Image: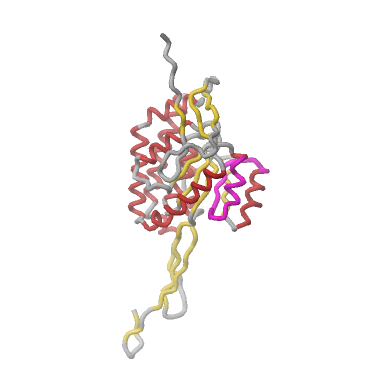
Amino acid sequence: MTRIEVLKTYKLYIGGKFPRTESGRSYPLKNVNGVEIATMCTGSRKDFRNAVVEARKAQEPWANRTAYNRSQILYRIAEMLEGRKAQFMDELMQMGSTKKQAEEEVFTSIDRLIYYAGWADKYQQISSSVNPVSGAFFNFSVQEPTGVVAIIAPEENGLIGLVSTIAPIIVSGNSCIVLASESKALCSISFAEVINSSDVPGGVINILTGNAEELIPHFSTHMDVNSLLYCGNDKKTIQLIKENSTTNLKRIVIKKDIDWIKDDNESPYFITKFTEVKTTWHPIEQIGASGSGY
């Protein structure tokens, strides 16, 4: 008797849970040979709005954690990914990568998580300052997280593109909603399973699968999204995002023609693209009649 293989139905990842899409829609995911290997949810506007609610609830508590704690959690994600590297290599090869390419992508993804974990409590040192002022004040500027960030992940990279966009955004205290690659989505929800077992609070990272053309208008117009990262080259989409984002002055970051494997595409300055500068004036208390201060 021939056994019929049970294909996995991959859910969305919203608020630390794996719900089915509200729309009830799905699409078949095929491997490089055209054979159906899984079923992916087609996320809807309602799914995105639910993800924004969860991201907003999670953002402030996540930002209030110490940088050292956020660093530990990113390192934990890397540890869990290391433990499942064989699975991710197999999934990448099913999507068309050679064994060598799959190994390089998985190992680079692990190393990139560790790279940003190391910068969690250090990037402030290169981007913050104590400012010279004339008067009895301390004046200092520090980086604070932007808030909720929407990410349109690279279409051509199922894993490294996802890791390279999520890690620098959450390390400063932001939360995010990611629209994963539609054609290479296999690693995306598998990576969500890694996140779910890595001490990341629910809602800090939310991952949707579906059609970019359908969802990008909602990503770019939502009033409770503070910033948007688009990884792609489509000129019409870029123009649409720029126009729609003026509704609440979202910060827009566009990444075009990026080879995410290269070390050039990891930098502490990528962290600061999703932070805001807060400048504080602090009075210096005067002591004694002589007017001396500290």
Please tell me whether residue 191 belongs to the stretch shown in magenta: no
- Tell me: residue 261, above or below residue 286: above
Residue 212, placed above or below residue 186: below
Residue 219 part of the magenta-drawn span:
yes
Residue at the far bottom in the pictured view: 289
Measured as percent of width and height from the top left, residue 117 is found at 38, 47
> What residue is rendered at 33% in x and 91% in y?
289
Per the rendered image, the range of residues in magenta is: 214-236
Residue 264 percent coordinates (x, y)? 49, 43
For residue 261, say whether it is visible. no
Displayed quadrant of residue 114: top left
Residue lying farthest to the top in this orientation: 1
Q: Residue at x 51, y 23 (%)?
A: 31
Q: Nearer the viewer, residue 266 or 92?
A: 92
Residue 171 placement (x, y as % from top left): 41, 50
Q: Is residue 93 above or below residue 258?
A: above
Image quadrant occupied by the N terminus: top left
Residue 70 visible at all: yes
